[in-house]
Amino acid sequence: MKWIAAAALCLAPTPAMAEVVSSSPHGFHVRQVVQLVIPTPLAYDGFTKIGEWWDAEHTHSGDSANLSLTLSPGGCFCERIPKTGGAVEHLRVSYIEPGKRIVLTGALGPLLYEGTAGAMDIQVERIAGGSRVTLDYKVAGFATGNGQALAPLVDSVLGDQMKRFRTYAASRPRS
């Protein structure tokens, strides 16, 4: 029985690694890393299905199903808000390397209301036993001079999202 538990631990995805890489009054760089025991194409594809794993608590509409990610230059990580007939562009797709990398630009969440700009770089790479997904988000601008205080908050929210992604990706069929 012990060997079954040990084997299960070896097959389980590792926890997310979080880091505030740097911060200053007018910007920050946060990093989230998850390792998955699935092939890189599945990890990449799973990440793009953002409405299936993003936490509804961190949406304007209260429903993650209203999120979409259009994978083309100028495409949108957007959200419909059916209750009001409105919508929000969370981030814009700036670069795509299918199966390997997506770069999104913009001000995520409450940063939208600050004078900031950001670049979110998502990289999927093959590692022994599966995949590693690294999310780097660099934000700079006015941020009411509060970049150092915002960095750990944004890092925490993105950490929660990446944990949800890890759980979602690990549960997907491997067809």
Image (cartoon, rainbow, N blue to C red):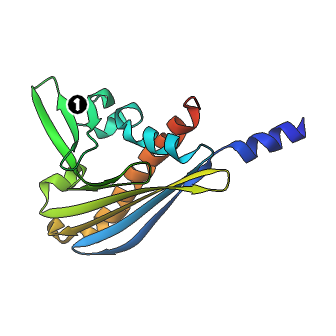
Q: Position of residue 116 (x, y in %)?
A: 16, 63
> Residue 171: which quarter of the image?
top right
State the residue in front, 14 or 160.
14
Give the residue at x 9% y 26%: 85
- Residue at the limit of the structure toward the top, as seen here: 83
> Residue 101: which quarter of the image?
bottom left
Quadrant the C terminus occupies: top right
Dot 1 amino acid type: Ser
Compared to residue 137, the image places residue 88 above or below, namely above
Compared to residue 175, the image places residue 34 above or below, namely below
**Residue neighbourhood size for the residue with mark 1, other residues' Cα within 10 Å, grouped as few (<14), some (14–19), many (≥20):** many
Give the residue at x 13% y 54%: 113
- Residue at the limit of the structure toward the left, as seen here: 85
Number of marks in picture? 1
Residue topped by disc 1:
61
Drawn side of residue 45 relative to residue 137, left or right: right
Q: Where is residue 63 in the image (x, y as percent from the top left)?
A: 30, 28
Q: Where is residue 79 in the image (x, y as percent from the top left)?
A: 21, 35
Give the residue at x 23% y 62%: 118
Drawn side of residue 82 relative to residue 170, left or right: left
Q: Position of residue 18 (x, y in %)?
A: 48, 60
